[in-house]
Image: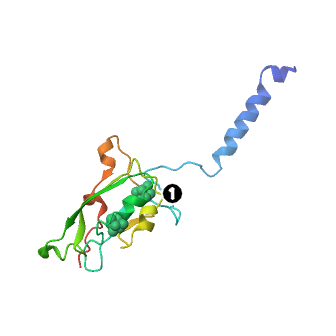
Amino acid sequence: MTFMERIYLPAVLKGMAITLSHLFKKKATIQYPEQKRPMSEVFRGLHILKRDDQGAERCTACGLCALACPAEAITMTAAERKPEEKKLYREEKYASVYEINMLRCIFCGLCEEACPKAAIFLQNDVMAPASFEREDFIYGKDRLVEPLKLN
Ligand code: SF4
Ligand code: SF4
């Protein structure tokens, strides 16, 4: 072993050169959540229960999405529409309760495919936010139904 090798100088210089070279490279990390990466066009994120053009809920509580769900993440309760609720629900039957357990969901999109009413979609730009509480991941109609558009 030479004197230089014994004082580790070549190895130290080599290590510093590697560190310095990384200073000028594009960073592999981003400052999340301030910065966000662009989502893929085929990304499947948080669900939304759509309304029709008149603002009525499209879902008829047929249950096909729950049946198609491989994770058994969807539960619902069907109810009959009252005459005065015509503007709220598109058809005679609607979901009085509709819940998705995001801890079970694998975001496969099969519920969207199964829906005959084009009522449920997975958004390609919204993720279920993180939380320490289990109940925060049970999404009910209050968080799933599309907000009313005010003209
Ligand atoms: S995306 Fe897949 S796993 Fe999630 S609720 Fe829909 S069918 Fe179930
Ligand atoms: S979201 Fe679609 S498939 Fe699911 S219960 Fe409603 S209408 Fe049926």
Residue 38 image point, x, y percent: 51, 61
Q: Is residue 64 left or right of residue 12?
A: left
Residue 46 seen in render: no
| Residue located beneath label 1 in the image | 37
Q: Residue at x 40, y 66 (%)?
A: 121
Give the residue at x 55% y 48%.
29
Tell whether circle 1 marks a residue whose Cβ is less than 8 angstroms from ligand 1: no
Instruction: Report the residue that reaches farthest toward the right.
Output: 2
Quarter occupied by the N terminus: top right
Quadrant for ligand 2? bottom left
Q: What residue is at 19 percent from the left and 68 percent from the top?
A: 80
Q: Secondary structure at mark 1?
A: loop
* Residue at 39% from the left image edge and 53% from the top image edge: 128
Left or right of 3: which side holds 29?
left
Quadrant showing the C terminus: bottom left
Image height of 84 relative to 61, above or below: below
Residues 25 and 138: in front is: 138
Quarter of image, res 55:
bottom left
Labels in figure, total? 1
Q: Is residue 36 left or right of residue 83?
A: right
